[in-house]
Every structure is written in structure tokens, then in C-alpha cells.
Image: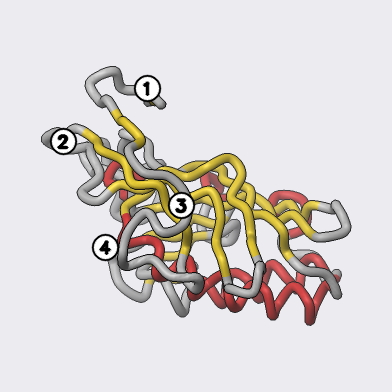
């Protein structure tokens, strides 16, 4: 399958598909498809994979919609976060999560607003080391949207606060609606940047 991202200088080719694409994968890990991607001075993914789901074992699958293109280093923290999301969803919403709504994964661009950001500061998205989640789909068909439910004293609002707090235990950087306007509608989780930055 030929994939053409926004920058035509990049050419990606899916070479393996499904769970078990790498010997390091297991039933308790994210299920990636291994990708080959060209390198560049500022953009490019060192170990690229396409993630279409997270698996907690025993057929407990959380889909990623649409599929995310990320560095393999993101799979471990995503799997840890996924385990806590399952517990939080049952506790606050009495329903399982069936999908994460992917707002952005790999993108060759600079950062968008925030402390210390400038025109020459490359985003972690440009390395496949950041993932933006705008919502969580539930087993009953509803979707908890960050932009609509964040900050509310409701079951959905409490779940989102728990999800944000849990993300901070697994990723180096977590940004949400309380950080700035650019993140008002999603959670930004990233690795390989400033450690322990949770807003």
C-alpha cells in the first residue's frame, strides 16, 4: 500500500501488517504495522509503525481511528495509558472504551503555540513522537469529545480528568485544554521532549 503524506519528499511503504509484525510485539502491546520512511534533516521517523489498535489481551481491543503513524517508541507508553483508560472508563462511565479518536500523529511541522515555542522549533509530531487524541468512543456508541466535555462536573468530564492524569504517568509531555488555546480540543501526549511536563 503506497502512502503519500503531506510532504511529497516522504515516501512510505507498508511492509508488514497486523499484530506480530515485530518479534517484540505481544498480546499486551500496541499492534503496529511496520513502515519504511525516508529520512530528512528535520522530519522523519526513526522506527515508524502504523497503529490501528491497542490490545490489552483477551480480545480487549481499542481501535485507533483513523490509524496513527508513530515511532515505535510510542507503543509502550500508549499501552500503559490504555490499561488505565479501561479502568477509568468503567469506573466513571460504566462502559468500555472501543476507540481513540486520532486528531494527529506524524506531521512534518513546527510547534503551535506554548511556552518556549518559536518558528524554528520542530514539533514532536515531525518525529512521530507525539499523538493527539480528541475523543474516546464507548461501547454504547457515544463519543466523549474533549472539546465538549472537558471541565464539566459530569461523568464524562470526570473521566477526561482521569484520562489526562493517567497520561501524565506514561508520557514525557502531556498537554490539554488548560494549557493553551491550541490544545483546547484534544490531549497531546509525547515522548522524547521535556520530561514530566503535564498541563
Which mark, residue 39?
2
The residue furthest top is 8
Which numbered marker is on residue 192?
Answer: 4
Residue at numbered disc 1: 4
Residue in view at x 83 percent, y 70 percent: 95
Q: Callout 2 environment at 10 Å: few (<14), some (14 to 19), or many (20+)? A: some
- Residue 113 falls in which quadrant of the image? top left
- Within 10 Å of disc 3 (Cα), the crowding (few <14, some 14-19, many 20+) is many
Q: CA distance from mark 1 to mark 3?
A: 19 Å
**Residue 44's disc number:** none
Secondary structure found at label 4: loop
Depth check: give the residue in front, 118 or 56.
56
Which one is earlier in the sequence, the residue at label 2 or at label 1?
1
Image position of 132 with respect to 106: above or below: below
Mark toward the start of the polypeptide (4 vs 2) = 2
| Place of residue 132 in the rendered image (x, y in percent of width and height, measured from the top left) | 51, 50
Label 4, residues with CA under 10 Å away: few <14, some 14-19, many ≥20: some
Q: Position of residue 92 (x, y in %)?
A: 80, 77
Q: Is residue 147 left or right of residue 133?
A: right
Q: Nearer the viewer, mark 1 or mark 3?
A: 1
Residues at discs 4 and 2 in contact (Cβ within 8 Å): no
Q: Which residue is mark 3?
A: 131
- 3 or 2: tag closer to the N-terminus: 2
Q: Quadrant of residue 190?
A: bottom left
Amino acid at each position: 500500500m503506497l502512502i503519500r503524506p503531506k510532504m511529497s519528499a516522504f515516501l512510505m511503504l507498508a511492509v508488514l501488517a497486523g499484530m506480530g509484525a515485530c518479534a517484540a510485539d505481544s498480546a499486551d502491546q500496541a499492534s503496529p504495522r511496520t513502515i519504511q520512511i525516508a529520512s530528512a534533516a528535520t522530519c522523519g521517523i526513526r522506527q515508524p509503525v502504523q497503529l490501528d489498535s491497542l490490545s490489552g489481551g483477551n480480545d480487549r481491543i481499542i481501535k485507533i481511528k483513523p490509524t496513527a503513524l508513530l515511532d515505535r517508541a510510542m507503543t509502550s507508553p500508549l499501552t500503559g495509558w490504555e490499561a488505565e483508560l479501561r479502568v477509568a472508563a468503567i469506573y466513571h462511565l460504566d462502559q468500555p472504551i472501543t476507540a481513540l479518536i486520532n486528531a494527529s500523529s506524524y506531521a512534518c511541522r513546527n510547534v503551535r503555540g506554548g511556552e518556549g515555542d518559536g518558528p524554528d522549533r520542530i514539533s514532536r509530531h515531525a518525529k512521530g513522537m507525539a499523538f493527539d487524541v480528541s475523543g474516546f468512543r464507548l461501547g454504547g456508541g457515544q463519543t466523549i469529545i474533549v472539546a465538549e466535555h472537558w471541565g464539566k462536573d459530569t461523568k464524562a468530564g470526570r473521566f477526561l480528568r482521569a484520562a489526562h492524569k493517567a497520561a501524565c504517568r506514561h508520557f514525557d509531555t502531556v498537554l490539554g485544554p488548560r494549557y493553551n488555546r491550541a490544545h483546547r480540543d484534544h490531549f497531546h501526549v509525547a515522548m522524547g521532549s521535556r520530561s514530566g511536563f503535564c498541563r
